[in-house]
Image (tube, coloured by chain):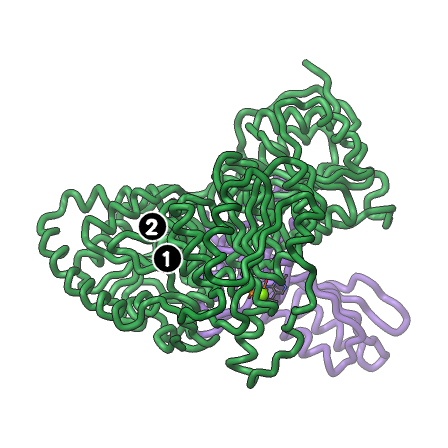
Amino acid sequence: MMKKNGAQILVEGLKREGVKVIFGFPGGAVLNIYDELFDATFLRHILVRHEQGAVHAADGYARASGKPGVCLVTSGPGATNTVTGVATAYMDSIPIVVFTGQVPTALVGNDAFQEADIVGITRPCTKYNFLVKDIKDLARTIKEAFYIATTGRPGPVLIDLPKDITSNTTDFSYPNKVAIRGYNPVYEGHPGQIKKALQLILDSTRPVIYSGGGIISSSAFRELKALAEKLNIPVTTTLMGLGGFPSNHRLSLGMLGMHGTYWANMAVTECDLLIAIGARFDDRVTGKVDEFAPRARTIHIDIDPTSISKNVRVDIPIVGDAKSILKGLITYLGKQKGLEKIKVSNKKWLSQIEKWKRTHPLNYKKGKEIKPQYVVEKLYELTKGEAIISTEVGQNQMWASQFYRFDKPRTFLSSGGLGTMGYGFPAAIGAQAAFPKKTVIDIAGDGSIQMNIQELTTAVQHNLPVKIAILNNRYLGMVRQWQELFYRKRYSHSNIEMAPDFVKLAEAYGALGLRAERPEEVVPIIREALRSNKPVLMDFIVSREEGVYPMVPAGAPIDKMLLV
Amino acid sequence: MGEILRHTISILVENKFGVLARVAGLFSARGFNIESLAVAETMDPTVSRMTIITLGNQQIIEQITKQLNKLVDVIKVSNLSGENFIDREMVLVKVAAQESTRAEVLRIVDIFRGKVVDVSPGSYVIEVTGDEEKIEAILGLLQPLGIREVVRTGKVAMARGQ
Ligand SMILES: Cc1ncc(C[n+]2csc(CCOP(=O)(O)OP(=O)(O)O)c2C)c(N)n1
Ligand SMILES: [Mg+2]
């Protein structure tokens, strides 16, 4: 058998797992690994400028490509800098594998230089984590980490590697199977439950599908569309579910929840059957949970049994993979008679929804200033809807979700669960690394972009021509909006006029900087940015006090919306 | 959401470092309560058994069970409270032993089939095993005689029959 040291085993493991790109930042505890990476030609290492950027980039890579994202950082501060990124991926069920260096095993627990108990720190925000204490366990640990991250409900897995483990040697063999007796995710839905669900669907007259990120992680896009079309069932998606159902489809209701469309929220409130698929009844979706879908029976399809009946009572729970369960439903449906009648009766329901849509469409008032919504609309038009869009957090995120019309899965990358400002730009870098030829745009806020602006260097160094579109309102806009509505316009510490000149900043980093101050400048600037093969930062000076509407005030039922 | 009841949950887990922290962390992070916890190796040295007594309504207990099952290191979860089971706890009681009370202490220990495991000039240490009712009863009787200290193991439990 071949002898290998820990660093060699790690690099070989990455190769066996099909890893092509790794995002990292070196330090003392991972020097052996970096030395090994020096010769690893199969692997592209992208050197970030802050470890948080590495994790978000790995996350963006994973969301865009469907493959696990990988990053490597050193011990202590390198490891603690990953925590926000790990928690972000955890909340949104994104498969990433994070390798952290650790002090040598003999020093673990001694408060040694650059020691942090990263396994303890990340225990509540990883799907699983490992501290490798014996070189003999390393190969199996790597195998298990990728397996756990990518199967069942996906999520981040962290492997902590003491420095001596990376230099110790052992006989190397890489396992080709994984057997973890406590971990056996269920994929097939229970046929009895699927049949019961089918009956509810056939009996309903006002059904709505409420679909989430699970549609995307299980690649159930086609099946979802097929089910909806078979019976004329309208589909609303969560923020995480955007792109899981084509926005331009006649059955699409757009997003629901706090900043969802009027008609999606009304449809959910009035429906007699709610079919939740790969969604978890988050409070930003349900509003006042006791009054969520009050007239509906509920079917809940989810791969994670703990998501079911956590926040709401469910009539028919089905645990399993969305794709396989939807396939099952469609098969049973094929054997049913009288579907045409149901299709027609659902049409009445659709025409009711159409009325809601006409009374309160998504709207904004045009003016002399650039409207942020207008910028997003133009980004959509000029990219023909074919860009990968990431977002920061705040108003920018909501306008992106409302006005860019996502038609394909894995084209919308946004921190939904944790709401991490600073996510979007490194995530865009990760997506660009996965798809060097595609247009990748971070729709950003002037506040959020400053949280990981250092990654401009990364984009420039690695020729990742990401575009940033700052909707620059000189405010922490979403904070300001809440203060406007709920704190009598007392704008306490949300004014961020004091900001760098973003155009000059972009240039200082070696990127292209462009600015638009009037509506007629928007289109030419987007065109110029899209033509460039460099990273470009577009600074759109937008009207300052624009609000995101509709808005459901926190804790209110979702049919009680503030409208434009 | 249903009545709040006491449940005895028996879990088989990997016998590895960090597993107790994962289980305890799950309870604390989600605001579930642990009334008692006992952990030890099973016949298979790679597996440990945890017996957890917790309180909750049906929905909470369902969440606890599902969340425990979701942990990678948890091999099997059984909620014994639904079935026929036996539980036992051991306590050590240090009780004052004056001239006047010594005989009474010994009589109580005898009735409860306990044992005196240490004798010092002013006190006895008594060992008793039993279910909750029995433990509470003996503690109630010893109380007036002067209990100095009580140490309880937490309950262990087992289903009857198969
Ligand atoms: C790391 C982090 N800190 C604080 C917040 C709270 N927060 C949510 S939105 C927001 C304002 C974001 O401002 P900006 O990036 O300019 O976006 P805008 O809302 O103006 O579009 C803040 C501070 C957060 N989501 N993330
Ligand atoms: Mg702003």
User: Which residue is located at x 41 percent, y 69 percent?
Assistant: A366
Q: Position of residue A84 (x, y in %)?
A: 65, 54
Q: Position of residue A378 (x, y in %)?
A: 42, 54
Q: Which residue is mark 1?
A: A237
Marks 1 and 2 in Cβ contact (< 8 Å): yes
User: How many residues crowd mark 2 within 10 Å: few (<14), some (14–19), many (20+)?
Assistant: many
Instruction: Looking at the image, tell me whether mark 1 or mark 2 is earlier in sequence order.
Output: 1
Above-or-below relation of A492 to A119: below
Q: What amino acid type is highlighted by mark number 1? A: Thr
Q: Nearer the viewer, residue B80 or A102?
A: A102
Q: Chain of mark 1?
A: A
Rendered image quadrant of residue A252: bottom left
Is residue B41 rendered to the left or right of residue A94?
Answer: right
Above-or-below relation of A410 to A403: above
User: How many residues crowd mark 1 within 10 Å: few (<14), some (14–19), many (20+)?
Assistant: many
Mark 2: which secondary structure? loop
User: Which residue is located at x 68 percent, y 14 percent?
Assistant: A1
Residue A546 in sight: yes
Q: Which residue is mark 2?
A: A245
Is residue A42 rendered to the left or right of residue A29?
Answer: left
- Chain displayed in green: A
Rendered image quadrant of residue B45: top right
Rendered image quadrant of residue A558: bottom left
Q: Position of residue A549 (x, y in %)?
A: 42, 71
Q: Quadrant of ligand 2?
A: bottom right
Q: Position of residue A117 (x, y in %)?
A: 75, 50
Q: What amino acid type is highlighted by mark number 2? A: Phe
User: Which residue is located at x 65 percent, y 28 percent?
Assistant: A139
The yes-or-no answer for disc 2 within 8 Å of ligand 1 is: no
Q: Colour of chain B?
A: purple
User: Which residue is located at x 19 percent, y 48 percent?
Assistant: A230
Q: Chain of mark 2?
A: A
